[in-house]
């Protein structure tokens, strides 16, 4: 899905379709861009001492496409960007293969880098794409840390909390720096988080 008026390409790929990194790099490349920032999310071979065989992704595609488009629009409102390309695979993704790829071009590197981090963080926090980790000895559906942080940060309307969309409009204006502190999750059920320096 290429967005009219802005150079944005969003694709959610069908099962067994690999991500063509060159296609997305070429899409965002332009003579006026002094920087292209990329993020490539790949399947790693271990997680907390368990051998990972593959990841499996499922999505509610129409809503996922709308949400990614909204994230790209927000990024454009926060930084001076030329082009954005986002691709996410569905189905099984073997160890070493790319499951999500983002490429963003801008005149200046700071805008491209900060926007790239913002886009992947927002995708992980709010887009209806679900991940199952398949291990050599079992499998488990995973919630992204960004989703858990967003859920605990905003609460629900029933408990008197603000809605996510209202809060996001305010907070998004303050997001301008790349690479927040790294966190280590000690217990997924309790969600204790330690900030690492």
Image (cartoon, helix red, strand yellow):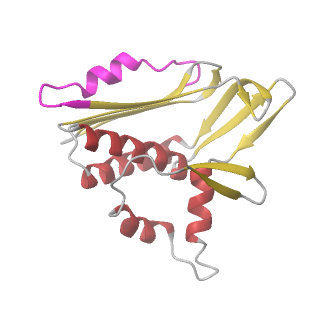
Farthest-out residue, left: 32
Of residues 98 and 17, the one nearer the viewer is 98
Q: Residue at x 26, y 44 (%)?
A: 111
- Residue furthest to the front in view is 197
Q: Is residue 155 above or below residue 65?
A: below
Stretch in magenta: 14-35
Q: Looking at the picture, does residue 25 appear above or below residue 158? A: above
Name the image quarter holding residue 142: top right
User: Residue 138: x and y, percent?
Assistant: 85, 31
| Residue shown at 77% from the left, 60% from the top | 190
In-image side of 155 versus 136 (left or right) = left
Q: Nearer the viewer, residue 76 or 187?
A: 187
Quarter of the rendering containing residue 157: bottom right
In the image, is residue 178 part of the stretch drawn in magenta?
A: no
Which residue is farthest bottom?
160
- The residue under the point 67% across, 57% down is 193
79 left or right, relative to 120: left
Residue 16: x %, y % from top left: 58, 18
Residue 165: x, y in percent? 45, 66
Q: Quadrant of the N terminus?
A: top left
How many badges with numbers are in the image? 0
- 70 is higher (above) or lower (below) than 152: above
Residue in the image at 21% along x and 41% along y: 6
Residue 141 is situated, as x and y percent measured from the top left of the image, at 73, 41
């Amino acid at each position: 899905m290429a967005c009219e008026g802005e150079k944005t390409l969003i694709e959610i790929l069908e099962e067994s379709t690999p991500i063509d990194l060159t296609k997305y790099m070429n899409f965002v490349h332009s003579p006026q861009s002094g920087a292209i920032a990329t993020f490539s999310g790949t399947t790693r071979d271990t997680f907390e001492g368990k051998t990972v065989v593959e990841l499996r992704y499922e999505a509610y595609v129409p809503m996922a496409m709308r949400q990614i488009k909204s994230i790209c629009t927000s990024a454009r409102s926060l930084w001076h960007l030329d082009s954005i390309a986002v691709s996410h695979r569905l189905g099984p993704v073997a160890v070493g293969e790319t499951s999500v790829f983002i490429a963003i071009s801008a005149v200046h590197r700071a805008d491209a880098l900060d926007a790239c981090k913002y886009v992947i963080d927002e995708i992980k926090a709010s887009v209806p794409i679900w991940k199952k980790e398949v291990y050599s000895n079992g499998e488990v559906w995973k919630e992204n840390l960004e989703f858990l942080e967003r859920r605990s940060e905003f609460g629900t309307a029933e408990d008197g909390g603000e809605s996510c969309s209202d809060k996001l409009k305010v907070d998004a204006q303050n997001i301008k720096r790349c690479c927040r502190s790294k966190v280590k999750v000690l217990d997924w059920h309790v969600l204790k988080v330690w900030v690492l320096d």
